[in-house]
Image (cartoon, helix red, strand yellow):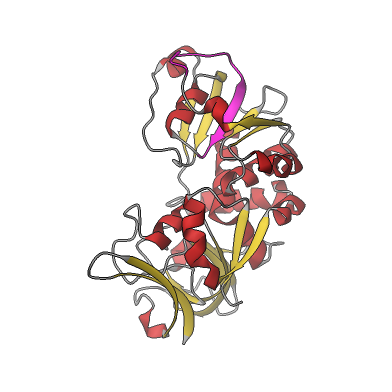
């Protein structure tokens, strides 16, 4: 028996999330290997799965947790053997496949990457899906010409998981970072991560109605979407790019094609879920070299498996700062 967070729905449609003791025979039958999970984390998508909102979980009962790190216990795949340290992010694990909010997980070997050299399983989950997405965003901006020395790079939702890691990476790489937050109390935290400028969320909350505004930002990593992204697009410098990673502000984009046509702005969609293995390995390699781990450690909040029922609603309300690391065995 082992402990897991089980999300279930009763006949009336009410969703509950509780820690239960379950047997290994309840794990998915068609996985290739079983992992003893050390750590998981909490992402916005996890909040949706824990609360049963957003339509991500289609069958109940369910174990959420879209990422985890741990040790292979048994394997039917020759690429991995018992004792190997591994990391999983994405592949819709935790959504349509039982995920990392348990002391054991059974998954497909294709979904794993070896734990990067120099990282512990705890630090790997301090990075997690959020940090992995942040690195993919930096790589995309670089591929589209972003270089240090220009106008500031804007990071929206900067005090969240993706934003915190993106701020720290960009600052280490020599970029001037403008961090957007709606929580003034996070200003010192963001400056400690390397932000040189704090932008109040209200300044970008609504488009001005103008198809173009003053060029302010050489690039942007945007976790908000909606009207904020629409306004940001009007302020990107000529030839600059926006890496879109989230939709906390909603899926609609009330904009025009003018920034794309007259300033050559690029809107880059960042998918971290179905990313090919080669891209994953390249991103993890850059994480090891370009993420300042003292900054990463400073943004970590330690939690236990039993805290997850409360953490799900909290992240949906924007009440989580930095990176939550969940010790599933504590």
186 up-or-down from 148: above or below: below
Residue 147, how many percent across, how many down? 67, 28
x, y percent for residue 88: 51, 62
Q: Give percent across and percent down for residue 279.
A: 53, 48
Side of 185 relative to 38 (left or right): right
Q: Is residue 189 above or below residue 197?
A: below
Can residue 33 be seen here? The reply is no
Q: Residue at x 63, y 61 (%)?
A: 124
324 shown above or below 72: above
Magenta span includes 219: yes
Q: Is residue 304 magenta?
A: no
Q: Residue at x 67, y 61 (%)?
A: 123
Where is residue 66 shown, x and y percent of the image? Answer: 47, 60
> What main secondary structure does the magenta stretch of the protein show?
loop
Q: Locate residue 250 relative to residue 41 in the image: left or right.
A: left
Left or right: residue 166 versus residue 88 is right
- Looking at the image, residue 14 sits to the left or right of residue 286; the answer is left
Residue range corresponding to the magenta coloring: 208-223
Tell me, yes or no, if residue 108 can be seen here.
yes
Marker count (numbered): 0
Tell me the quadrant of the picture where the C terminus can be found.
bottom right
Q: Quadrant of residue 146?
A: top right
Which residue reaches farthest left? Answer: 11
């Amino acid at each position: 028996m082992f402990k897991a967070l089980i999300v279930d729905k009763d006949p009336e449609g009410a969703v509950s999330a509780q820690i239960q003791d379950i047997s290994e025979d309840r794990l998915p039958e068609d996985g290739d290997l079983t992992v003893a999970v050390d750590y998981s984390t909490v992402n916005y998508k996890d909040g949706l799965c824990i609360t049963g909102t957003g339509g991500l979980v289609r069958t109940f009962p369910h174990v959420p947790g879209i990422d985890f790190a741990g040790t292979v216990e048994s394997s039917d795949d020759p690429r991995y053997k018992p004792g190997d340290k591994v990391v999983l992010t994405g592949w819709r694990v935790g959504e349509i496949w039982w995920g990392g909010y348990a002391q054991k997980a059974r998954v497909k070997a294709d979904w794993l990457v070896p734990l990067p050299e120099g990282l512990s399983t705890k630090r790997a989950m301090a990075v997690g899906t959020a940090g992995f997405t942040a690195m993919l965003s930096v790589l995309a901006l670089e591929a589209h010409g972003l270089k240090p020395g220009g106008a500031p790079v804007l990071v929206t939702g900067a005090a969240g998981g993706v934003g915190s890691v993106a701020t720290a990476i960009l600052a280490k790489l020599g970029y001037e970072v403008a961090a957007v937050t709606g929580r003034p109390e996070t200003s010192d935290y963001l400056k400690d991560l390397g932000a040189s400028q704090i932008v109040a969320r209200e300044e970008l909350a609504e488009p001005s109605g103008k198809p173009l505004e003053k060029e302010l930002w050489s690039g942007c990593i945007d976790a908000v979407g909606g009207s904020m992204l629409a306004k940001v697009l009007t302020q990107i410098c000529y030839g600059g790019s926006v890496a879109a990673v989230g939709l906390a502000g909603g899926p609609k984009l009330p904009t025009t094609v003018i920034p794309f046509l007259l300033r050559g702005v690029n809107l880059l969609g960042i998918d971290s879920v179905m990313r090919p293995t080669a891209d994953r390995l390249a991103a993890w390699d850059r994480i090891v070299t370009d993420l300042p781990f003292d900054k990463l450690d400073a943004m970590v909040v330690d939690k236990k498996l039993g805290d997850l029922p409360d953490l799900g609603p909290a992240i949906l309300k924007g009440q989580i700062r930095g990176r939550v690391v969940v010790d599933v065995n504590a």
